[in-house]
Image (cartoon, rainbow, N blue to C red):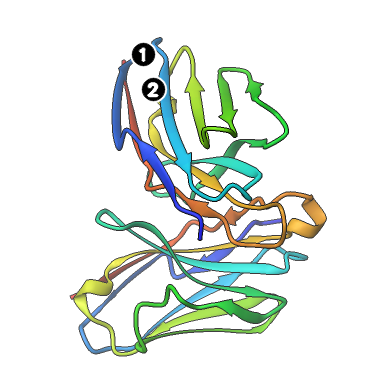
């Protein structure tokens, strides 16, 4: 089955700097890669996603990149703000009707 | 839509007691998932349903855990008897991948369970 690894487990950056979180997956059949953000006391929420037929996707300060050959995908947050502080989960799955496999999470702290 | 609704938000109980967690998925969603989150193990999938039928319960830790989905708008996760190591945040999520063309999971706010 699919296995998703995520690094780093914790990340501290100064406000305004960039943050990068990297993930790898094992199942070459996976073709959909969502990223979720979990704020304190809340459930995870989807913030951006990418399909396997696309190499990069951007939404304001957030971008995701995918290298399907290497089975790597990454989340990039530019101009970080204190409200970006949260736990971020990468995930992988097939777009068929199946479960989503989550990575272990990265705790991001943005220091004002 | 109000989103996925879980109750209670917090539950404190004593070891050996029965605990029932409840979930109302988003209307029209045909998949429902139960997760457990701890610092040590992260976000673990316990069980998921499709059209009220359990599909994969391989993540259920042991026989003390059971889950039901009697209809499309309600699911329960029961722990009997509860143990201190069951203390965690339990999340319910729902999705409708056939309608959305991608597998977006919508999470509830979670139930924080403390077993003393």
Q: Say which residue appears at 56% left-offset and 22% top-offset.
A: A62
Q: Is residue B47 left or right of residue A17?
A: right
Task: Give me the chain letter of mark 2.
Answer: A
Check chain identity for marks 2 and 1: say if they share one. Answer: yes
**Image quadrant in which you'd find residue A23:** top left
Q: Which mark is residue A84?
A: none
Where A89 sits versus B1, above or below?
above
Q: Say which residue appears at 34% left-offset and 84% top-offset.
A: B62
Alpha carbons under labels 2 and 1: distance apart: 7 Å
Percent from the top left, x then y, of residue A73?
Answer: 52, 32
Question: Callout 2: 10 Å neighbours few (<14), some, many (20+)?
Answer: some
Percent from the top left, x then y, of residue B7?
Answer: 48, 70
**What secondary structure is marked by label 2?**
helix
Where A27 sits versus B15, above or below?
above
Residue at label 2? A82
Q: Is residue B72 left or right of residue A35?
A: right
Where B95 sits versus A79, above or below?
below
Which of these two is toward me, A27 or B49? A27
Residue at label 1? A15
Residue A91 visible? The answer is: yes
Cβ–Cβ under 8 Å for marks 2 and 1: yes
Going from N to C along the chain, the mark reached first, 2 or 1, is 1
Which of these two is toward me, B34 or B54? B54
């Amino acid at each position: 089955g699919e296995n998703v690894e995520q690094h780093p487990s914790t990340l501290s950056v100064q406000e305004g700097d960039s943050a990068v979180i990297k993930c790898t997956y094992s199942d070459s059949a996976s073709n959909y890669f969502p990223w979720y953000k979990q704020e304190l006391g809340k459930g995870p929420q989807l913030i951006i996603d990418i399909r396997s037929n696309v190499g990069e996707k951007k939404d304001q300060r957030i971008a995701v990149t995918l290298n399907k050959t290497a089975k790597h995908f990454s989340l990039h947050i530019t101009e970080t703000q204190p409200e970006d502080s949260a736990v971020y989960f990468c995930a992988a799955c097939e777009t068929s009707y199946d479960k989503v496999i989550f990575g272990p999470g990265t705790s991001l702290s943005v220091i004002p | 839509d109000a989103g996925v609704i879980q109750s209670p938000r917090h539950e404190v109980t004593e070891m050996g007691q029965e605990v029932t967690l409840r979930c109302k998925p988003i209307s029209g969603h045909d998949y429902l998932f139960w997760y457990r989150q701890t610092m040590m193990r992260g976000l673990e999938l316990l069980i998921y349903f499709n059209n009220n039928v359990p599909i994969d319960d391989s993540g259920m830790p042991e026989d003390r855990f059971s889950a039901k989905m009697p209809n499309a708008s309600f699911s329960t996760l029961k722990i009997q008897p509860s143990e201190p190591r069951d203390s965690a945040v339990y999340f319910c999520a729902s999705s409708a991948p056939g309608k959305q063309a991608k597998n977006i999971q919508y999470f509830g706010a979670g139930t924080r369970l403390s077993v003393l």
